[in-house]
Amino acid sequence: MNLALFDLDNTLLSGDSDFEWSQFLIEQGVLERELFEAKNQTFYDQYKAGALNIHEFLDFQLKPLSRHSRKVLDVWHEDFMRIKIRPMMGDAARELVAKHRDAGDICVIITATNSFVTAPIAREFGVPHLIATDPEHLNGEFTGKVAGVPSFREGKITRLESWMSERGWDWSSFAETVFYSDSLNDLPLLAKVKRPVAVDADETLLKHAQQHGWEILSLR
């Protein structure tokens, strides 16, 4: 049994779903451009630099979910998929997922982006398992807060090992573990798997991958 782990933003997607969700809400007039656009860009730049405070970002990202009903959010998300996400889903990424799925590997998208944004994207890729940052909800509606450990940096390992344990697995259950990621923020999990793959990597991850002889791949 093999485990194939995929980061989502700038790995399977040729862009960042978290960033684009906020941009989509700004473009739809749901969020005020003057207040939110610069802050959205700042958080994105901090993420790329490996300097993101995940709790400050989640407060920014999840609050808008609490201001609208789930029914309205789901309608917006359908448009978001059509306008923003499907154009970022390239053939090479779809083929990579299909290769692992057809081989019978356990396929998991593991992402820091919240599960409201990413669950429909995982389904679109045909990946049955998603580990994402979970927004807290009450009576079916979002509260604007995070539930549990964010799936970010070392938190990805915590969440993954919890997910394994729920299924009676641990790292030794798998003959091979592979993780595809673009980001320096995923170095903790990349160092944990048997086969780390740097995909269209940022400068820090690319340098690390070259120094350690990791596989380097482009899906663009």
Image: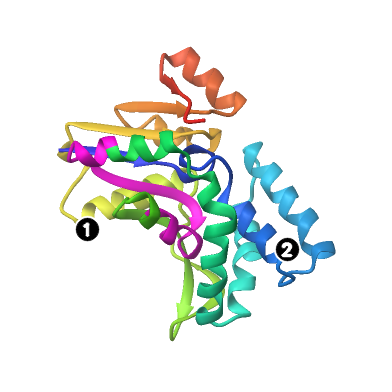
The crowd level at tag 2 (other Cα within 10 Å; few <14, some 14-19, many 20+) is few
Question: Could you tell me which quadrant the N terminus lies in?
Answer: top left
Image spot of residue 38 (x, y percent) = 80, 54
Which residues are the magenta region?
Answer: 99-122
Sequence-first tag of 1 and 2 = 2
Depth order, front residue of 40/86: 86
112 lies above or below 90: below
Task: Identify residue type, mark 2.
Answer: Glu
At a point 64% along the width and 38% down the height, the residue shown is 48
Q: Mark 1 points at which residue?
A: 166
Q: Tag 1, which secondary structure?
A: helix
Is residue 57 located in the magenta-colored stretch of the structure?
Answer: no
Q: Residue at x 66, y 61 (%)?
A: 24
Quadrant location of residue 172?
top left
Q: State if disc 2 and disc 1 touch (CB < 8 Å).
A: no
- Residue 101 magenta-highlighted: yes
